């Protein structure tokens, strides 16, 4: 019986699925970063610098990465309407959550905090009130893979239309659904980020095998031929998100 590799002996970028004792997020991309050692493999004590470096390495617009990190590293509050100074509902951290050097950190499981960046009507996770909102739901995953009209790639209109279908279903089935304008914007930006980071152009979409690698294996799709972009601008990301929102709304 083969023994599991020692994570400390793995090179940066080498893929190894986390162990049951490692912490993971409801976000497959963040989990992929951990599984490749681009951030802490254990999912613990992630610093802003390490996360920003990892996001830059996969080709996310630097301004988008900085904005994401600035929000993520705020102290979390459940009071979204009137947050205390220095806190944010979308933040992940506890007060005084720092590493041994006094540097602010968070753990990947804190990404799933209520009212933070994660939201109901996930593509592959259940709603918070209905079940497991942290781990992959196989039924939702199978439905996601079936949503593209052309089975070789995911395009923004496929995912926008699919988000519209999911919204109607969840609105009917979940009386405790939380999905307002902020959650809608976050959901559209997630799809846009997938398109801009892993896509092959607006018309080409994201290859099916890239989605399978990221959502199922929580692995960056290097083996499938993906190469990180050298340049991306925030305006492109926002523009694609607006297109997703259009298809999700009409």
Image (tube, rainbow, N blue to C red):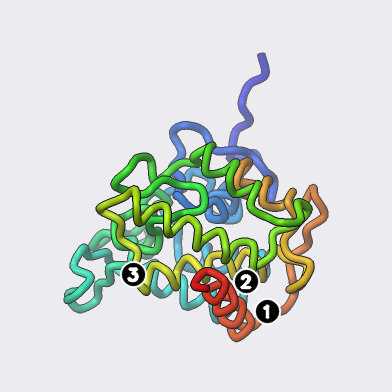
Residue 232 - label: 1
Q: Are marks 1 and 2 in contact (CB under 8 Å)?
A: yes
Position of 145 with respect to 168 (left or right) is: right
Q: Tell me which label, 3 or 1, sits earlier in the chain.
A: 3
In the rendered view, tell whether residue 151 sits above or below residue 58. Answer: above
Quadrant that contains the N terminus? top right
Query: How far across and how far down the image is residue 114, in percent?
Result: 29, 56
Residue found 57% across the figure and 55% down from its top: 29
Position of 246 with respect to 103 (left or right) is: right
Query: How far across and how far down the image is residue 65, in percent?
Result: 53, 73
Position of 179 with respect to 65 (left or right) is: left
Residue 82 - label: none
Position of 205 with respect to 48 (left or right) is: right
SS category of the residue bearing label 2: loop
SS category of the residue bearing label 1: loop
SS category of the residue bearing label 3: loop
Q: Within 10 angstroms of label 3, few (less than 14), some, or many (20 or more) residues?
A: few
Camera-near label (2 vs 3) is 3
Residue 60 - label: 2
Q: CA distance from mark 1 to mark 2?
A: 6 Å
Q: Within 10 angstroms of label 2, few (less than 14), some, or many (20 or more) residues?
A: many
Q: CA distance from mark 2 to mark 3?
A: 26 Å
Q: CA distance from mark 3 to mark 1?
A: 28 Å
Q: Tell me which label, 1 or 2, sits earlier in the chain.
A: 2
- Residue extending furthest toward the top: 1
Q: What residue sits right under mark 3 in the picture?
A: 180
Which image quadrant is residue 183 in? bottom left
Residue found 39% across the figure and 46% down from its top: 133
Query: How far across and how far down the image is residue 231, in percent?
Result: 72, 79
């Amino acid at each position: 019986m083969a023994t599991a590799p020692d994570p400390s002996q793995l090179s940066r970028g080498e893929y190894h699925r986390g162990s049951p004792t490692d912490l993971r997020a409801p976000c497959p991309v963040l989990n992929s970063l951990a599984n490749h050692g681009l951030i802490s493999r254990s999912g613990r004590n992630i610093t802003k610098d390490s996360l920003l470096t990892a996001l830059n390495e996969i080709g996310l617009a630097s301004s988008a990465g900085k904005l994401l990190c600035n929000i993520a590293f705020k102290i979390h509050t459940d009071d979204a309407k009137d947050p205390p100074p220095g806190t944010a509902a979308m933040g992940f951290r506890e007060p005084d959550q720092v590493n041994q050097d006094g540097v602010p950190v968070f753990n990947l499981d804190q990404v799933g905090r209520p009212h933070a960046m994660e939201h109901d009507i996930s593509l592959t996770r259940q709603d918070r009130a209905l079940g497991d909102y942290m781990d992959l739901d196989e039924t939702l995953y199978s439905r996601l893979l079936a949503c593209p009209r052309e089975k070789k790639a995911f395009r923004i209109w496929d995912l926008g239309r699919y988000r519209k279908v999911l919204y109607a279903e969840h609105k009917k089935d979940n009386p405790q659904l939380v999905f307002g304008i902020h959650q809608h914007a976050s959901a559209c930006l997630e799809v846009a980020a997938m398109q801009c980071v892993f896509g092959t152009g607006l018309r080409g979409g994201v290859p099916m095998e890239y989605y399978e690698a990221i959502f199922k294996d929580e692995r960056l799709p290097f083996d499938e031929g993906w190469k990180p972009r050298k340049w991306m601008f925030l305006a492109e990301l926002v523009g694609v998100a607006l297109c997703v929102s259009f298809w999700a709304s009409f």
